[in-house]
Amino acid sequence: MITRNELSLYSLTDILAEQESLPKEIRDPLVAVADWSCEFLIPGHPELGRSGPVCPYTKPSMGKGHFWYSCPDVGAEPSDVADTVLRYLEWHQEMATAIDERERQFLTFLIVLPAVDPDSPDALDEIQLRLKGEFVQRGIMVGQFHPRCDQPGLWNEDFRPLRSPVPLLAIRYMVPFDLPFLVGHRQHLEAYLHTFAPDIPARVRTYLAELAATAA
């Protein structure tokens, strides 16, 4: 475990090997999310729509020691959650400065939020949307995961890859293939192009061309 200004981060080993020493109020949600990240994000899935793991970055991130979990002492009030997540964003960027530039894309925080009602997570979706602009301007993505998340998969519209056992927000670096998550907002798209142009992969350039043709 590492700490910074009353915030804490746990590695997978911290959670699974030392779980009996964790306070119960954070142990159960952290263990549930740790199990989910290993059993759902790392393997493939028959409904994914492509081969490979559900999240291609989880396993290498864990292997490099850059995958972290947190369960902060915060309730469900949207302003409190947003303020706490912004503090984690600052910590994420601080940690990134000590990581080789080639590995920074793997630095990931899962901020577990058990106080958010899993059966009525609209507030979490709104918090994510409110924070997204500031995050993408810094080249960072913030994603919402919860048991009722209806955002479809990129390769199968019937697949729901963002459903987690406990509500959480994930922080990680933007990567070229995040484009589909950013095209719906002009400022988000401009931030993406600022980050990756002119080194946008051919597959993504094709996507942009098709998007422009559709808009025309």
Image (tube, helix red, strand yellow):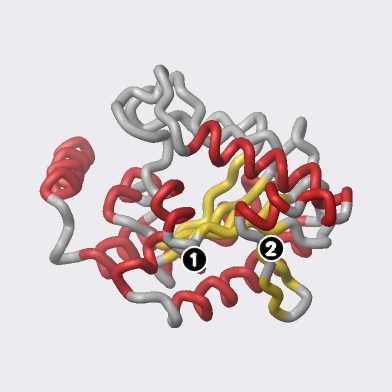
Q: Residue 212 or 78: which is nearer the viewer?
A: 78
Q: Position of residue 87 (x, y in %)?
A: 65, 73
SS for callout 2: helix
Please tell me which residue is depicted at 38% across the width and 34% down the height of the picture. 53
Q: Please tell me whether residue 57 is drawn above or below residue 157 in the rendered image.
A: below
Please state which of residues 180 and 177 is positioned toward the viewer in this rendering.
177
- The residue furthest right is 24
Kind of residue at badge 2:
Ala
Q: Residue 146: percent from the left, percent from the top? A: 65, 38
Eyeballing the image, is 156 above or below 23?
above
Q: Which residue was labeled with disc 2?
A: 82
What's the mark number on residue 135? Answer: 1
Q: Position of residue 22 (x, y in %)?
A: 82, 55
| Quadrant the C terminus occupies | top left
User: Residue 86 is drawn in which quadrant?
Assistant: bottom right
Residue displayed at 27% across by 54% down: 176
Q: Residue at x 35, y 76 (%)?
A: 100
Asked if the residue at tag 1 contacts the one at tag 2, i.e. Cβ–Cβ closer than 8 Å, the answer is no
**Residue occupying the point 18% across, 65% down:** 197
